[in-house]
Image: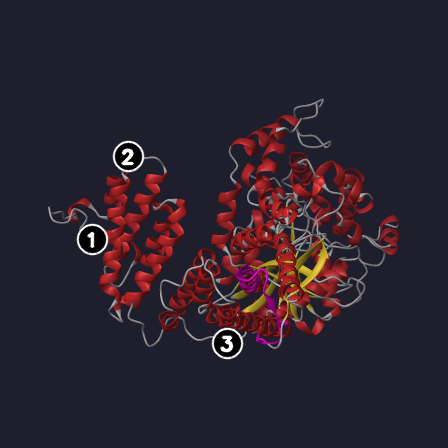
Amino acid sequence: MPLSITERIYFPEARLRRNNQDSTSTPSSWLKAVCQMQRPSDPLDHSLIAFCAVQIRLSGADISHNETVQLYNHALSKIIAVLGSPSEGNSDEILAAIVMVSTCELFLFHASTSWKAHAQGISEILRHRAVSDTNTQNWSDLCRRLCVICVIQAMLQKRPLILEPYVWRQHITPTAAASFGGLLDLAIDIPSMMAETYDLSHTEYSFEESLPYINLLIEKFHDIDSWRVLHNKTTSEQSQTPVYWSVPAKASNPTDSYYTDKLFPFALIFESIESASSWIFGSTMMLDILDTVLLLRPNATLPRLDENIDDNNILNISDTVQPDADKIARLLCQAIEYCYRIENGTFGPQITCYAQTTLRTYFSHRGLHRELDWCKAISDMTGPGASFGIAFIQQTQVKVKSWRSPVGFSTNWTNEGVSPDILQDVAQYWGSEYDWSSIEAGLNRENNHYATSITINGSYEDPIPLHFVHQQSDDPNAIPLLLLHGWPSSHLEWSKVIVPLVDHADTPFHVVAPDLPGFGFSPAPTQAGLGPRENAQVMHGLMKQLGYSRYGIVSTDLGWQVAMWLVRDSPSSVIGHITDFFAVQATPDDLNRLAQNQTTKDEEAYIESNNIWYSTHSAYSTVQSQKPLALSFAFTDSPVGFLGWIWDLMHAVSDGYSYSYEELITDAMMLFIPGPYSNIRAYLEAYKPGLLEFPKSDVPTGVTEWSNANGPFPELGPFQFTPRSWIERSTNLVYFTRHSSGGHFPAVSHPKEWVKDVRSFFSTLVQ
């Protein structure tokens, strides 16, 4: 029944045609209607049906394996039938069909054969494809990805590529030597060499017979090593940071608990996940090559790796190949922690699959049992900001379900904090209904996510890894716009405004929305001293790295302080700065004027509201700025307790905005992932003497203020209504507006009005 429902969705019954010869033949163009395709795509229709059949079978529904295979074969034949046409066979519809039917192979066949079937299916498809003179970028990208899959499959099984290297090269557009495509071009020839060498190792052979194979493999080893050097040099020049560097490891492998020391006390941090992917793939192939050489002749003698092998130049193999192989193996193990960071999503662990298999094989051949056990336990590793498999999420769920609520004197929400009953309800939802995987999928679907590293001047010496969203407008003249969030927040504060900012005919923006270090998917700082002024350098470095010499800034909360220092230190780069939070306190002169009844009503209301805030609602900032570590001891192992802490603040300043449980939990997760200490401690850095004192700036500034009068504490209504004259003391104020509602998170509660203010401010600057 489920399959018949699927057929009706894709092939409307009025158009269904069946005959005795071909029970699966359905000349439908349903996809054309709903996707506005220029023409029907029979191969894509049938590939989708096959894919659905596989998923239905996996769910345990009543569809046989033979039926599913029949649908898969039929879809494959439909694709192959059109691949010979340079026009139709190179369309994006056929590309999508290939992706669908290729995915089927991984689930349709037994685990022991599915990968081989996948490689065979890919090879069969591309063998029939008539390559267009002008490969589109989509096709080139797909072919490279398929090639990587097939190369890894062949390397692991020690078999040649099913599709010959010269055919692969017809499908892959030539790329720069230092790019990943350059590495792939080198890699295509290696599987056949490895296969022949591996076969030789299982026969009786003479040393002379092995020399040609060893020399060829060592030559390829050098080629890949040269590629790594070139790739590292090119990447470093572009990003102004090394491809990778070493830091103390934070993750824990359970096998280390049996020893007095960590097996790998240091971890590698990469310039970006893209750089990590290329480096790991190349390094793994190098280790695979050396392991095969060692396997070929365990007792043979070899020259140094910088020389060819002949009978006149022989050294012991343990003095040559072994040290290089050991070094590469250790570096690959040290790369695991970075790849499993949560900001890299599921892609990070995927790029280590080939490496993990090769490492286990190598350590097994060497008889290194501790190293082998370490690799087998990678999925059980834990660490701050790391997601080893789904262990981090599972552990969080366990902690949520075991949370013990305090007994309060009231079931109502009071100034003491969140009602225990309400928080218990949130915990119940979190433990039973909340689905982080769907949230993660939504984040990846809605925005373009990137990771990089920035190095700054000053006392903070370590490179600073950073996650950010970069959403570009189609308009090349769009204004680059840096969005800086505060606490308790992350880049998610801008979720409702990014698309409206980007997609606008009159004043479009290229939006860059980073997570501040220690927030969201940006890892925690590795040393003290990364305060608002240093973070300003980080953000300026990010914009320069993206190619934006001049840009606008939007800020709030702690992000406002970062923005103010950015304006102070890099004024020529800032087009303008608009904020919805301008935190100015009364000066001694202001308080003098208040005592003498010389202040305005606006000033009096602001001073009074601020006095109420600091006397009854600001305990969180005092503790976080003075005792962040002590506070973090309570929160690091209690996700529900941490949510209750930040929710109490959000409730007080959100002007009555009602957060859903999903919103609250996701906001808490974005701060819980890197560890509460890293973002709580931002207050200690922000409140250091002198960091709230800014000299007068000429950079055009806009301030948009939002009332908090509709929240649970109406006396805080004018808390954010900083008097205009006070703002003008340190800024070139060219735009000022006030709203009767909105609270502290107007981009969340009033996104349309917020976007209108931002656009109005910048439209006056670029005319």
Residue at numbered disc 2: 62
Locate residue 412, reporting x and y percent.
Answer: 66, 26
Give x and y (percent) for residue 294. 57, 61
Does residue 569 appear anywhere in the picture?
yes
Q: Can residue 32 be seen?
A: no
Is label 1 in a helix, a strand or a loop?
Answer: loop
Left or right for 647, reference 294: right
Instruction: Report the residue at 31% width, 35% height from top.
Output: 61
**Earlier sequence position, callout 2 versus callout 3:** 2
Check residue 176 in the rendering and tell me which mark sits there, or answer none: 3
Query: What kind of element bears circle 3?
Result: loop
Amino acid carrying label 1: it is Ser
Q: Residues within 10 Å of mark 3 (few under 14, many from 20)?
A: few
Q: Which one is in front, 411 or 257?
A: 257
Segment tinted magenta in the rendering: 285-311
**Residue in the foreground of this view, choosing between 245 and 263:** 263
